[in-house]
Image (tube, coloured by chain):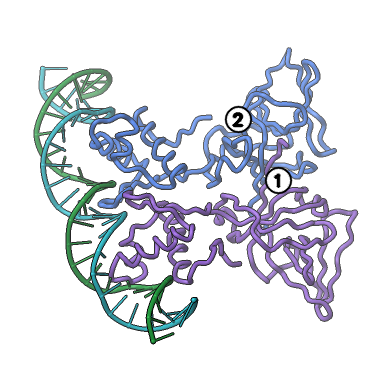
Chain colours: A purple, B blue, C green, D cyan
DNA sequence: CTTTTGACTGTTGTTATATACAGTACACTA
DNA sequence: TAGTGTACTGTATATAACAACAGTCAAAAG
């Protein structure tokens, strides 16, 4: 899962931006020019200054003039809400970022990489309601019993995973829905990730 | 809901600490001595320095020597996980902070004030499973249909709220549990808050 | 082929910031 | 009643940090 919020940053600029993000998460302070320079091995802090100017010009950060550590991220740090997936009949998930939720990825274990809003009632017996947001850890590995984000062609669905030899069963947690059976010899099944957490918002509607 | 993480801070020191927290949340940068001084109307930045030393000595913050804005909170900013409440038969909730979860209170609407881990299965049909963490907005007001944290004596429970005149019905979302009926003329019922969100962790157990 | 842009080195002036030192006033404790 | 801690004012200074200016070099754009 790429972490690209960028508009049209150069690879180097993206690295600088990532370093700023990391500074904020680890030290809860933005870096100084000198710290950036030393982290990247620059001989001059001005190299960092140039990069910051470029990032500011491209709108990725804003610079507080005259303020020590005056680097502000324009993006909110948090997890990208990637799309909406129908937990019932599989409808495609939009592959672009809809929103960012200010949630610490390390809140979940293993780390959450992105979020997915669930539509429909097919996972209701697993306590996943319509509108719930699932925290997903990106992985192509899944073990039986895990709730996975699976892609068959360009249709994405959230189901409980069960493998029997070459047959994979994607089980809805709702007795009104029948399991989806996939023979991995004939059809391509991609595991996009596994659910590691859930966030329910707007309980007071 | 008190925000007391403090050990034995003076009122003034708590104010300074709160200002640092606020700076971090609003500007995502700790304040400088001069900023603290000007916010509190100090004529000298050294007053701020003294307070920071006191806070560091008492373990509330750490100071990075020689670093601009080198103030680090020892506490994690986030929501206090206040206790564990059995959603089934009402067991008392421990009134002290067990843990802090790094969650933005503004993630939920209205704002979450504290968190409560739910034990038991009584709310399972509302999609609240054993071990789920409820985000609670502190209020004594509740309207019918809301999921509330209610206290009867020193027993705390999570149920769906329904008032009929002086009778309050606390309804479990599980057909195996009977509603709790409280006559507010005889018994004291305190609404501690309403559920505004839910976080499910450890889905991969 | 010239110009622009990205990615730097190297230097320097200015100001933002931390921090030490000296002192005042007041409340609380031994 | 001397001592200690809190809560400041006021001054001073070293340095952390920003930010401007002058370059170099290579790759991409026009």
Tell me, for residue B130, which label it has, or none: 1
x and y percentages locating residue B163 in the rendered image: 78, 22
Q: Residues within 10 Å of mark 2 (few under 14, many from 20)?
A: many
Q: In this orientation, which residue lies closer to the viewer: C12 or B29?
A: C12
Is residue B129 found left or right of A173 in the rendered image? left
Which picture quadrant has residue A42? bottom left
Is residue B69 found left or right of B122 in the rendered image? left
Say if B155 sits above or below A38 in the image: above
Q: In this orientation, which residue lies closer to the viewer: B116 or B153?
A: B116
Q: Chain of mark 1?
A: B
x and y percentages locating residue B109 in the rendered image: 63, 37
Q: Residue beneath label 2, please?
A: B138
| Disc 2 + disc 1, Cβ < 8 Å | no
Which picture quadrant has residue B39? top left
Q: CA distance from mark 2 to mark 1?
A: 22 Å
Viewer-nearest of labels 2 and 1? 2
Is residue B36 found left or right of B18 in the rendered image? left
Residue at point 66% right, 48% down? A199
Say if B80 sits above or below D25 in the image: above
Q: Residues within 10 Å of mark 1 (few under 14, many from 20)?
A: some
Residue at point 61% right, 67% down? A1
x and y percentages locating residue A130 in the rendered image: 77, 48
Say if A69 sits above or below A201 in the image: below
Tell me, for residue A200, which label it has, or none: none
Mark 2 secondary-structure assignment: strand
Residue at point 78% right, 52% down? A119
Q: In this orientation, which residue lies closer to the viewer: A151 or A34?
A: A34
């Amino acid at each position: 899962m790429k972490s690209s919020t960028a508009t049209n940053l150069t690879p180097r600029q993206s690295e600088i931006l990532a370093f700023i993000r990391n500074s904020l998460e680890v030290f809860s302070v933005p870096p100084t020019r000198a710290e950036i320079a030393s982290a990247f091995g620059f001989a001059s802090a001005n190299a960092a200054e140039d990069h910051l100017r470029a990032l500011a010009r491209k709108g990725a950060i804003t610079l507080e003039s005259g303020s020590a550590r005056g680097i502000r991220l324009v993006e909110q740090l948090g997890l990208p809400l990637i799309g909406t997936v129908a937990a019932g009949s599989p409808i495609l998930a939009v592959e672009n970022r809809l929103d960012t939720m200010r949630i610490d990825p390390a809140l979940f274990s293993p780390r959450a990489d992105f979020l997915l809003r669930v539509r429909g009632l097919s996972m209701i017996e697993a306590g996943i309601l319509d509108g719930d947001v699932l925290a997903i850890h990106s992985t192509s590995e899944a073990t039986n019993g895990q709730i996975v984000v699976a892609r068959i062609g360009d249709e994405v669905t959230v189901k409980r995973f069960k493998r029997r030899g070459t047959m994979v069963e994607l089980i809805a947690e709702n007795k009104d829905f029948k399991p989806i059976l996939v023979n991995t010899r004939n059809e391509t099944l991609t595991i996009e990730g596994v659910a590691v957490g859930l966030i329910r918002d707007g309980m007071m509607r």
